[in-house]
Image (spheres, rainbow, N blue to C red):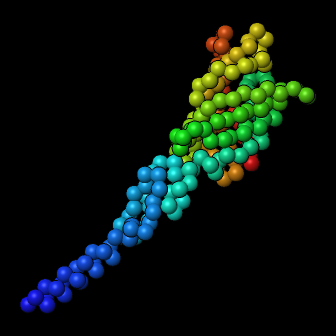
Amino acid sequence: MNKIFLALAVLSMGLFSSCDKCKDADCKNGATCEKKVGDCNCAAFYEGSKCDTETRTRYNHNYTGTLEIPPSFPTMPTIIAITSDGTVASAQNYKIVVTTGQNSSTTIDIKGNLTSTTAFEIVRTKVPFSLVPGETEAFVSGTGVFAGDSCTADITIQLALSGTAFTAKYAGAK
């Protein structure tokens, strides 16, 4: 009788220990592990088999494109350089270089955050703005999307003095 109990105990331990495939998974950054298959379920803004890669790092590139500001501004060549910002896995820096004339450009630094694995928001920021006579500053904010090697954004520009607001369209690629 004792041999039967011992055999059942050994069999039970083998069955239950084989169900936990997470002991070797080594999931990172707050990920959970699916015990039956041993796969890591990544926390927001992390990816990879062990969740050890921040999603935002795949977007850290220069995107070259154009900025269209309606109604009467010419389309302007624009480069947006995106880098990671700080320790929050969704935070990003945007350095926007807008070519406003033959040998003239304006550089603005703003912050943003991923809102999903492919979408981002631009945090409202006061920046220099000289395209409208009498205006020297504007507030910018907006939203955008990454798709493959491209980046598009709708950027709201609100003039600081007059309060006039318009939405610019950006489209660029790596």
Q: Quick check: 108 above or below 33?
A: above
Q: Quick check: 29 above or below 164?
A: below
Residue 105 as seen in the image, left or right of residue 69:
right
Outermost residue, right direction?
102
Q: x, y (%) of residue 122?
A: 60, 32
Residue positioned 67% across, 35% down in the render:
94
Q: Quick check: 148 above or below 12?
A: above
Q: How many marks?
A: 0
Is residue 152 visible in the rendered image? The answer is: no
Residue positioned 59% across, 46% down in the render:
56
Question: Which of the 4 quarters of the picture holds residue 157?
Answer: top right
- Considering depth in this image, is 123 or 109 the residue closer to the camera? 109
Q: x, y (%) of residue 163?
A: 63, 13
Q: x, y (%) of residue 28?
A: 47, 56
Outermost residue, left direction?
1
- Considering depth in this image, is 68 or 27 the residue closer to the camera? 27
Residue positioned 60% across, 38% down in the render:
85
Is residue 77 visible in the rendered image? The answer is: yes
Q: x, y (%) of residue 111?
A: 61, 32
- Considering depth in this image, is 34 or 121 the residue closer to the camera? 34
Residue 112 as seen in the image, left or right of residue 70:
left
Q: Quick check: 8 above or below 86?
A: below
Residue positioned 52% across, 40% down in the render:
88
- For the N terminus, the image quarter is bottom left
Residue 136 as seen in the image, left or right of residue 105:
left
